[in-house]
Amino acid sequence: MSNLECSVIVPSYNRRASLEMVLEGLARQTVAGYRFEVIVVLDGSQDDSDKMLRRWQLENRLPNLRWHKQTNSGQAVARNRGVEMSQTPLVVFLDDDVVPEPDLISVHLDWHQREGGAIAVLGDCEIVREEKDSLYHLGVWAWWEDKYQFRALPGHSPGYRDFCTGNVSLRREDFLRTGGFDTGFRGYGGEDYELGYRLQKAGVRFISDRQARARHYHRSSVSGVLRATRQEAHGDVLLGAKHPELRTGLRLIWIPEGGFGKLVRLALYAPWLGDRMMGLAQRVLPWLESRQLRWPWLTLFSYLRFYAYWRGVRDALGSEGEILCYQDDSLPLSEQTLDISQGIPPELPPIFVDGPSRLTITFRGQELGQIRLHKHIEESLPEYLSEQIARQLGQRLWLRLSEEAKPPVILKQNRLEQLAESRNHAKK
Amino acid sequence: MSTQVLSVELTEGLHDYTNLKDYSQVMVLIRSQGRPLGRLVLPVEKGSLKATDIWAAIEADGDLNWQLSQATLKNWLLQNQPLEADLPSWSVIVCTRDRTEDLRRCLDGLLKLKGSGGEIVIVDNAPSDDQTARLVADYPVRYVREDRPGLNWARSRGALAASGEVVIYTDDDVVVDPNWVMAMIEPFGNPRVAAVTGLTMPLELETRAQELFEFNYGGFGRGFRRKVYDYTNMVPAAAGRCGAGANMALRRELVNKLGLFDVELDCGTIAQTGGDAYAFYQLLTMGYQVVYSPEALVWHRHRRDYKSLRKTIAGYSVGGYAFLARCWFLHGDWQAVKVGVSWFRNDHLKQLKRSLKRNRGHLPLDLSLAQIGAIPKGFQAYFTTRKQERATAKQKVVVEPQPDSLPAEPIGGRR
């Protein structure tokens, strides 16, 4: 066992075919098979996945393949069990529909060798596209693509909401030190963010690398995602209950006005009616899609998801009064200070992306003003900040700058010219 | 009665312009650090334009002021941020047909481009003589010939011959800005971006026809703010609004894989225009983003004589409705119907009303009528081209790729 460098932990539930593809992917790694082990945890699968795994063990294409079968008890328990079984310093989590590219493990190992210390490497799970994508699938692809892109941008430090368990590696020691996944999260979602938050608090640095690639065979449907959204709300409630400081960043922290507010009331007070209405609305979606009426489809789908989310909140909290109490117990917005005497600093602290926060902007020690940041910024953070500062505090900043020197803020070289020049250097 | 086109760089300071005796007004593009911020139309007094007048006009224009302060502040705030490291390689593709005078000016502009890692490909589309080939031989560019007449076929051939990851298309009647290529390839760092379009300004407004196109018809102007389009904020059937084919960049891999331009649309075919819109349409429906970046600036020489202006404007109707018919009939896209109706109501009918009432800045009545009269031809063009496509699909003609006449040579960034 001493040669092993990392354990790949794959929890699985009733997905024999795609699990086999994951194993195929692992058998094709550029890293030699004796350097890593594969631990599959079958979380109550009833589709003969165990027979398939036995066959793999007989064929011996993965020298260190082990598996464990348990009664269905959720992803959190399954992953914790996998880590318990492993004995290597590093663990890599993969989902059972995430097929690794041949260099995946070597990219993960390289990072840990190079950086050492407490880091977690977040890899890509690129959604596999089909010849003719449904609108739903298209949206899923676009959402994940944006997420991977922005969290890997220079100047952007990944936050706890970037910690997804589909393709991630970290030290076993850090996992155990923070206590692993919270087994209180039984449904879909929430447990990964929660662990991510504890890891970050414990000083684990997140690194996002788009080179650590895997292909995600995402196969869910509209009704599946609506069910998942309902469970996600449950996860959000648990997350906020465990870490009240995160409540301000949750979607359930305020009930919107207008049409969406009415949907919330419907979900809270007349779920029997709401469920029926949403069931009917769901049947309209395929018709809209067949005529490629994209906007009506998108609008209706966003209503359905919104309703499903609040339906989940009702499952978890019960009544509007309890939701109000839950919202009230949230801590005030986190306050932070950023000095921009030399422009936005190249290295930003990671905490900015965790929920909405009020940011005090100072210039040479003097306060310029406050700007409010919105939750879950899904674009390049420095660019977003520059946009907000210029828009909200532009006039004051302009005045301060023109007091300093004249002509004030004009930089001689254009950004595009800098780009062109840096490129010329690179070529030489 | 003509308009002088000027470009003013604010960081270099303003100065007086004399020698404007032949012009009644001036169109000024205001730039700061190379970034286009807005344009002003100012009258010429006694054959000159004073710097103070330009500055007063800038100060009086609220939007321009806002743009200027925001752009400057953002640039200052981001001065210490790392630059996007690996940008894709590029190929500029110029499609031309028997217009050596324009092409020479275009090539001279292209040689001033900044940023290495690219090449220039000239696609000669069904030429009637060897003039273009002889002109191109003097320049460090590649020459490719496409014998099927039609701008779309030329674009297709260009993408097959190109070697860059991004193909940047422009026309022979265009002069590019030195920063054009860098502005074009910058957004491609994001894999979701499949196409980038840019700002197209008039190169000259010497004749009445050119002024009519720019001011009364609306020109190619798409504003001075960067926009990111995808299927959630833009109806794919309205893709014509994303930008124009004279100033667009696409991922080569997608162009070739999806055959984006392998359609009988655009110049030289019966549909006359619409090839660019159809390419954007296909990309948008697949979930990709199209970015409009005003920093990617080119100067386009509009048609000088009135007859070609009328032909161009009627051509937009033909190509536009041929494209919409294609979306509706071939792709089953019902949003195309809505786009078609609102285009007719909000643009064509409104322009007709203005022409009849002789409002300020109206189009001449015959132009308004010409663009409405051309609509049935659009539908006709769609059915004709579909018939042709079905016929060629039966024959299964495979066109052999032609050998390139000149080896690839790197362009740009030579110091």
Image (cartoon, coloured by chain):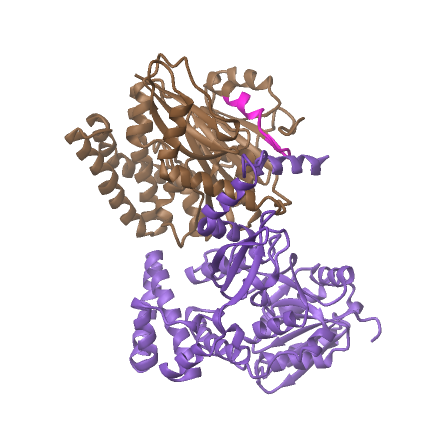
Chain colours: A purple, B brown
Q: Dividing the picture into quarters, in which one does residue B414 lie?
A: top right
Quarter of the image containing the C terminus of chain A? Answer: top right
Q: Pick out the residue farthest to the left.
A: B357
Q: Pick out the residue farthest to the bottom.
A: A71
Quarter of the image containing the N terminus of chain A? Answer: bottom right
Residue B199 is left or right of residue B60, and the answer is right
Residue A213 appears anywhere in the view: yes
**Image height check: is B25 above or below A226?**
above
Q: Dividing the picture into quarters, in which one does residue A117 lie?
A: bottom right
Residue B48 is left or right of residue A151, and the answer is left
Indicate the position of residue B263 as horizontal and vertical percent values. Answer: 42, 38
Residue nearer the viewer, B379 or B208 = B208
Residue found at x 32% / y 71% = A261
Indicate the position of residue B401 as horizontal and vertical percent values. Answer: 57, 33
**Image height check: is B259 above or below A268?**
above
Residue B183 is left or right of residue B39, and the answer is right
**Image height check: is A296 above or below A20?**
above
Indicate the position of residue A345 as horizontal and vertical percent values. Answer: 62, 51
B316 falls in the magenta region: no
Q: Pick out the residue farthest to the right.
A: A2
Magenta residues, start to end: B106-119
Residue found at x 27% / y 42% = B343
